[in-house]
Amino acid sequence: MSIDQTTAARIAKLARIKVEEDALPELAEEFNAILGFIEQLNEVDVEGVEPMTSVTPQRLKQRADEVTDGNQQAAILANAPDAREGFFAVPKVME
Amino acid sequence: MMDELNKLSLAEARDALKRGDVTSVELTESCLGAIEGSGALNAFVHKTPEIAMERARAADERLQTGDAPAMCGLPIGIKDLFCTKGVPGQAGSRILQGFVPEYESTVTQNLADAGAVMLGKLNMDEFAMGSSNETSVYGNAVNPWRRSGDDAQLTPGGSSGGSAAAVAADLCLAATGTDTGGSIRQPAAFTGTVGVKPTYGRCSRWGIVAFACSLDQAGPMTKSVRDSAIMLGAMAGHDPKDSTSADLAVPDFEGMLTGDIKGKTIGIPREYRMEGMPAEIEKLWSDGADMLRDAGAKIVDISLPHTKYALPVYYVLAPAEASSNLARYDGVRYGHRAKLAQGDGINEMYEKTRAEGFGHEVQRRAMIGTYVLSAGFYDAYYNRARKVRTLIKRDFETVFADGVDAILAPATPSAAFGLGEMKDADPVQMYLNDVFTVTVNLAGLPGVTVPTGLDGQGLPLGLQVIGRPWEEGEMLNAAFALERAAGFVAKPEKWW
């Protein structure tokens, strides 16, 4: 399965990374090199094998459903590139 | 006062502090002086001398009262991936430029509670993605080792390249690292130091910038196996803030270092004997097996049949998890935001911010991860890789069930290579650096690399001991036996 420029552009879009038009051929080529390497996995018989979901066989712990944190507005906004009046500010979202 | 206190090991410094022969302030000043003179190595990227001196003075007070925890007064470096409150940290990435964490990672908190003195933050590959520290926004970290008669700059390995360079050059007594596919063990091997990747879940991941959550583990990078045992004990422990952190008691790892491995069974995996393996690596490996045999261990040939699929599995799963983890860098909550053009909306902001903020390798992996998780390819790539991961883990479970106590393997396919040497290589070529280390992450096992020899050009080479899950103590003891038998004492000649 080979990745063409249209697919490369679609992947970049899905990943929300701007890739200039003239960089697409090289990107597609790199994807193909990596995916070609990954193709080896098709040789393996995985019939009846469960996908690994947990590195260590353990049940995820449950905790009491209670508030343990909060009231940290200043700390949460401290690193924001644009924070105004206690909110994160972003460009226009709605058309 | 002793000379060159920065050259001490953790154990030597700890014992000297307890005897009152030195103070933490003296140790810390010695390291800060070494750091000042080490600009050419580009290892320390955010220095914290005020924090260091404050903690050193506090440690000296504790030592005076006889209340000295395990790392009391010992100056260490911290990989830039760990969030440390009030100290800039950007995971080697432009996208986190200016980020100052409002909180402290559990591991660095544990170290601080154990009395350790933080000297600063250490260089690394961007988001821990790399094997040569060449993807860092701070520029390359440089290996203090050079080939004999050659002043070409070499890589200290990656991603924990700054940590490895700093420990090897005696800028600190020890450092933290993180290991997702070999990022502690490969740089340790390239710099003649000891690096431990603990069992998955042994050290909390909370507050460490995430690369691939099911693979990431923090661990110590030190000058000796004993030092790793001391530091791992201080880093480890259950943390309710990390749901995959194991609720298990932390053993006294140092106390388990007897050097006695009589009757232990050490497996030599035949699939690690790669085609085209350099004769030097092959010899190093068989010499290591002989050393363990001489120490009383039983050496057996074992098979891990799915080994050759570990790298392709890794290069599906790690990018998949990374693409998800990197989604948070959106220019809204922290770090860099691109300057926008008139009329740009939120999507343009995301796309421009991420294009400017992420370096090439990180972009590539985020996109590969996006692809293998996308509709129509999820089963073919991601799910298939997770199934092969089950088989890789089963390979190890089988040999451990057959009575193997630990596994001996090479750490890397070569000694440190030159910075820039791999520039024109295909990305897959660079990924091959992880061929001996990545299986351990996939199976969640502990692994340690120990320097055991020099190559023909005078560069260090390391061997790797892989342990059973949760048996870091026994693994470190085998590594200790190997360290003693190998008697590796070489140090890089100071040129920086």
Image: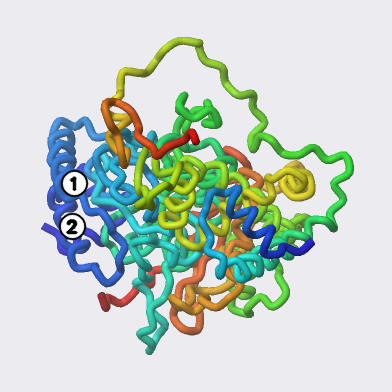
Which residue is nearer to you in this view: B267 or B74?
B74
Residue assigned mark 1: B52
- Chain letter of mark 2 equals B
The tag earlier along the polypeptide, 1 or 2, is 2
Q: Position of residue B72 (x, y in %)?
A: 25, 40
- Where residue B305 sits, quadrant-wise, is bottom right
Chain at numbered mark 1: B
- Quarter of the N terminus of chain B within the rendering: bottom left
Q: Which residue is drawn at 64% across and 74% down?
A: B282
* Residue at image point 47% right, 24% down: B240
Are the residues at dot 1 and dot 2 in contact (C-beta closer than 8 Å)? yes
Judge by depth and name the residue closer to the eye, B197 or B208. B208
In the picture of the structure, the residue carrying the numbered disc 2 is: B32
B157 relative to B94 in the view: left or right:
right
The local crowd at label 1, few if under 14, some if 14 to 19, many if 20 or more residues have their Cα within 10 Å, is many
Res B312 quadrant in image: bottom right
Residue type marked 1: Ala
Q: Which residue is drawn at 30% across and 32% down?
A: A77
> Which residue occupies the foreground of this view, B340 or B13?
B340
